[in-house]
Image (cartoon, rainbow, N blue to C red):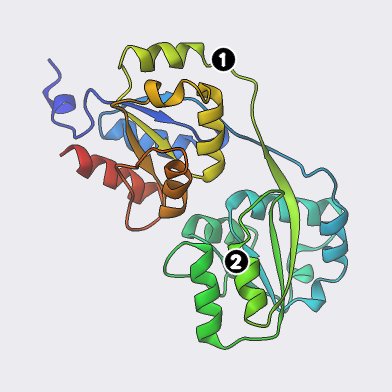
Amino acid sequence: MDTEKENKPLSGKKVVITRPPDQADEFTDYLIKLGAEVIKFPVIDIAPPDNWNALDLAIDKLDDYGWVIFTSVNGVKSFIGRLIERGKDIKGAMFGVRICSVGLKTADAVEQYGLRVDFVPEEFRAEAIAEGFETMGALNEKVLIPRAQAGREVLPEELSKMGYRVDVVPVYKVVRPDIDVSWLKKMLSSRKIDMITFTSGSCVRNFIEFLGMEEYKLLLTGVKIACISPVTAESMRKYGIETDVIPERYTIEDLTDAIARYYM
């Protein structure tokens, strides 16, 4: 008998991760160290936008912007990747433009390219950026938001109300992968899944669609739900399902800790 494993808070728990494969390793490692059996069921893939027209136009006039706001690691990678494809020097292109990042991981992604992040909101939500900008009093500047092709409108709307001139440009899109769901449905029907984790509204929406609108509520009966933020939890609530675990800080590390505390 492995006593050490049994003493871990997530021993015997089967936890589903719905993140894309290239973003799931860190979360997987955290959960395994706490004793969980991790089941990967990626419900989103990241693809290029339908076209690069809006981003290319923005890149050609980066000097016009006072701020660039990155709301995800995917946004950073896609934006910088396009800069490189266009033959731009990263630091040179971004010289004089201040950078705001939603979340520490997003900020880390920016800094990996040798750029400095000027503002990270205390709460890792788009709404908190608008509040922070208002506090800083940096009004009437032009703001660029490179983000997913389909995204929440809270941030650009709030900034526009405050007097900012906001350009939202798609730098990637979220798509559903072509994967087999039958095995997961069998595990859910047999009540072999303890918890399912979600890190975005897109993950929630695609997961529900994979299960089927007529089946998901029955299949998720008794399954615990962990969401990385209140925004993601609200996406789940729209389908009539309440979230059991939400961390105080919206990071993978804090989500993992919150899951562990839930089972202690």
The residue lying at 51 percent from left, 30 percent from top is: 208
Q: Is residue 247 above or below residue 135?
A: above
Q: Of tags 2 and 1, which is closer to the observer?
A: 2
Q: Is residue 192 visible?
A: yes
Q: Quadrant of residue 194?
A: top left
Mark toward the start of the polypeptide (2 vs 1): 2
Q: Is residue 28 above or below residue 107?
A: above
User: In the image, 139: left or right of 35?
Assistant: right
The crowd level at tag 1 (other Cα within 10 Å; few <14, some 14-19, many 20+) is few
Foreground pick, 192 / 153: 153
Q: Which amino acid type is shown beneath numbered disc 2?
A: Leu
User: In the image, 91: left or right of 259?
Assistant: right
Q: Position of residue 119 (x, y in %)?
A: 53, 73
The crowd level at tag 2 (other Cα within 10 Å; few <14, some 14-19, many 20+) is many
Q: Position of residue 63 (x, y in %)?
A: 81, 76
Residue on which the image places disc 1: 180
Q: Which mark is residue 165?
A: none
Q: How many marks?
A: 2
Q: Position of residue 204 (x, y in %)?
A: 50, 37
Quadrant for the C terminus, please.
top left
Foreground pick, 216 / 149: 216
Secondary structure of the residue carrying numbered label 1: loop
Q: Quadrant of residue 97?
A: bottom right
Q: Is residue 211 above or below residue 240?
A: above
The residue lying at 65 percent from left, 21 percent from top is: 178
Residue on which the image places disc 2: 155
Q: Is residue 96 above or below residue 150?
A: below
Secondary structure of the residue carrying numbered label 2: helix
The residue lying at 25 percent from left, 29 percent from top is: 35
Q: Which amino acid type is shown beneath numbered disc 1?
A: Asp
- Kindly report the distance in space between the C-alpha atoms of the residues bearing marks 2 and 1: 35 Å
Q: Is residue 115 visible?
A: no
